[in-house]
């Protein structure tokens, strides 16, 4: 009976080591977010990238300060309460430079103290491909805003019965 128990423990330890190596080689790690304490506890892989201490803990506030992409809103306690986005990509400032991190919520649990704990994974993304996609998205968003401004100007001109030159329209779009 003792050998079965010891064998089971060894198997679990081997699984843990194997899965840890597998995730690290895939540029992935895990995290848990405690909504009551507003802190993340991160795997060794994520802790190394973010240069965290041996506890692997970082507050939501400190994590949010590392988000570089102006278009990306910070993570908040409220964002974990709402099921709207279970996956998001961040551009993070790290001691070794900026990295793209894809983070995904996997599941939630309530601990014995009644606090909600959110569990997820994070994957470091290849920068160039992700950066190009992000730039294309930002460019299309800017074009959409310009289109809306032109429509508003045209509507305003029709209502006022005014006519604008092309240079006046370009100046108005850039001014807005």
Image (tube, helix red, strand yellow):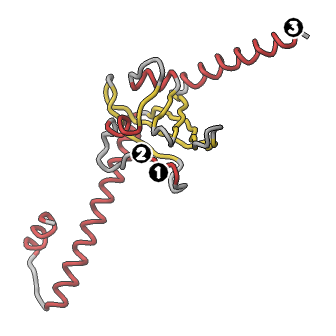
The residue depicted at 31 percent of the width and 65 percent of the height is: 144
Q: Residues within 10 Å of mark 1 (few under 14, many from 20)?
A: few
Q: Is 25 situated left or right of 1 in this image?
A: left
Q: Which mark is residue 55?
A: none
Question: Would you say the residues marked 1 and 2 are in contact, meaning their CB atoms lie under 8 Å apart?
Answer: yes
What is the quadrant of the N terminus in the image? top right
- Pick whichever of labels 3 and 1 is earlier in the sequence: 3
Closer to the camera in the image, 121 or 25: 121
Q: Which mark is residue 3?
A: 3
Distance, label 3 to label 1, CA atoms, is 47 Å
> Based on the displayed image, in which of its 4 quarters is residue 100 positioned?
top left
User: Dot 1 lies on which element?
Assistant: helix
Residue on which disc 2 sits: 75
- Pick whichever of labels 2 and 3 is earlier in the sequence: 3
Q: Is residue 108 above or below residue 97?
A: below
Q: Is residue 15 above or below residue 37?
A: above
Q: Please, which residue is most extreme toward the top here? A: 3
């Amino acid at each position: 009976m003792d050998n079965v128990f010891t064998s089971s423990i060894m198997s679990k330890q081997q699984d843990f080591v194997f899965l840890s190596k597998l995730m690290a080689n895939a540029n992935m790690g895990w995290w848990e977010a405690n909504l009551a304490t507003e802190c993340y506890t991160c795997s060794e892989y994520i802790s190394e990238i973010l240069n965290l201490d041996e506890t692997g803990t970082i507050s939501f506030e400190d994590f949010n300060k590392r988000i570089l992409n102006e278009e990306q809103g910070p993570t908040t306690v409220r964002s974990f309460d709402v099921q709207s986005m279970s996956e998001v990509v961040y551009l993070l400032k790290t001691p070794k430079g900026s990295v793209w991190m894809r983070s995904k919520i996997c599941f939630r649990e309530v601990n014995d103290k009644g606090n909600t704990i959110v569990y997820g994974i994070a994957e470091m993304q290849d920068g160039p491909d992700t950066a190009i996609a992000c730039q294309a998205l930002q460019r299309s968003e800017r074009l959409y805003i310009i289109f809306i401004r032109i429509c508003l100007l045209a509507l305003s001109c029709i209502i006022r019965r005014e006519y604008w030159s092309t240079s006046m329209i370009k100046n108005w779009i850039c001014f807005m």
